[in-house]
Amino acid sequence: MVFLRLWHYLAGYLEIVVEGPALERFLNLAIRKGIWFWDIKRTNQALRVRMRVGGFSKLRPVARQTRSRVRIVKKNGLPFVVYRFKRRKGLLLGAVLFFAALYLLTSYVWFIEVKGLERLEPRVILEAAAGLGLRPGVPKWSLSSEAIEKGIVDRVPEIAWVGLRYHGTKVIIEAVEKTHSPPVETTPPREIIAGKPGLVTKVLVLHGVAMVKEGDMVTPGQVLIWDPVVQPPDPGTSGLTMVGARGEVKARVWYRGYERVSLEKEITIPTGNEFKRVSIVIKDREVTITGREEIPFAHYRKKVEVKSLPGWRNTNVPVELKIVTYSEVLVEAERLSHKEAQETAIKAVKDRLMRRIPTEARILEIKSEVLDADESGVGVVVTIETEEEIGVPKKSQ
Amino acid sequence: MKIKGGTFKDRLAGLFELPREIVMDVPRITMIGNLQVTVENHRGVIEYSPERCVIGIHNGQMTIQGRDLVIGIIYEDEITVTGFIGAVQFSA
């Protein structure tokens, strides 16, 4: 039907109104003459009919025979449009000018928007952009996004990154401000306290009084070095700088962890067999195209991939293509020996403990011991002894 | 003789599985829901108004009754009536 209508439009058609006493007879006779009619509607005593242009002259004898009156009410289709434009050259010129103007005007930048600023004024960015040639009224082809992005970052020191996006005649400048680290504490720490429990091995005081000595056991939070001088800053002593408690306290620290490993272990081996299911998601409905049958594997890994069309302006195309790939895996039970299980457990605990040990710490000893071992698994305790700095400055209120 | 011939043609059509509308000269009528009726092999429009459309067929006429009836396409051997169709009736 669409093609038929398109054909009618290209060939041109007439809309005629037929009035007379025997309209059905008029239709039948005209059809016998090979005239095509469509969209025939009746209004009162008249027929409104569409027909091709060529058949109109054949209608005259039919109208006379049935004593009907035929009148053209509308001429539709491309030939008539072309004819109209041929007669009215000004209209054609206007249309061409309109499209030319539209094209020309849309290739300029008319609006600039700045996004993503929190502290900075958008004006700062706009000024920097204007200095680089990006201001309302400049043609888009004269702009180099890369140079402007780089230029703004160079010119505005508070900006870390800038991205340009074109949205028709609008340019959106997305800027990211540099984040500053919080201001340094003005009051130096009054105390240095222990961050971890341990056995103190070395105390080196740079400023303040040592509260512990070598060989002491300390608990977290215990004061190690204390500076009696420091006070909250007050305007009268602004010329003096407070030093605060300073020093180094090293201690032996023990890390301990337990892990039990089962002798039964499940391992999965991919077989390489794959099964794909492709479906189209339209809003909330999902239509499977291929792979409608059951998944032919007992155990599988599932990977979902969704492909959607890019959104345009504010509309998101609600149609997505969903491809689910099922990869077959074999699940096999493996039995570990006691020794293997023990090694696995030791390694697991070590890895876990190592994450808590600072990199500067010196590892003195690693001890492991089997705590419980039976038919089902092995449990292991690992102890790591280190020597490390345990002092942390206590934040003053 | 005519009736006998008709039955012979009918049997012939049945035997060779030929389309009856070709062998017997009866119209082929296709309906799409209550929205459209297409009559192939018709004998012209006898009466037409938005509520009632009478179409001639080989040995009588068929009446389509309904609302907002429009003759969508009309050729020498095919006619399509669209609209809201209420009833289709045959009479000799």
Image (cartoon, coloured by chain):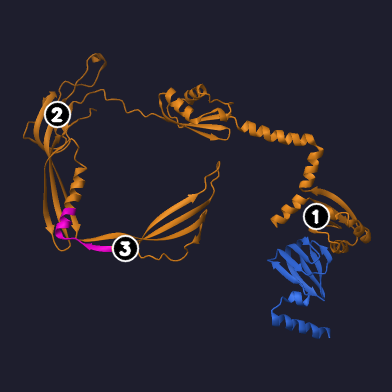
Do the residues under discs 3 and 2 have CB atoms within 8 angstroms? no
B51 in relation to B13, above or below:
above
Residue A385: x %, y % from top left? 12, 42
Which residue position holds label 2? A248
Which residue position holds label 3? A330
The amino acid at mark 2 is Glu
**In the rendering, what colour is chain A?**
orange
Mark 3 and mark 1: span between their CA atoms? 70 Å
Tag 1 subunit: A
Residue A211 visible, this angle: no
**In the rendering, what colour is chain B?**
blue
| Mark found first going from the N terminus, 3 or 2 | 2
Do the residues under discs 1 and 2 have CB atoms within 8 angstroms? no
Query: In which quadrant will I find the C terminus of chain A?
Result: top left
Disc 1 packing (10 Å; few <14; some 14–19; many ≥20)? many
Mark 1 and mark 2: span between their CA atoms? 101 Å
Tag 3 subunit: A
The amino acid at mark 1 is Arg
Disc 2 packing (10 Å; few <14; some 14–19; many ≥20)? some
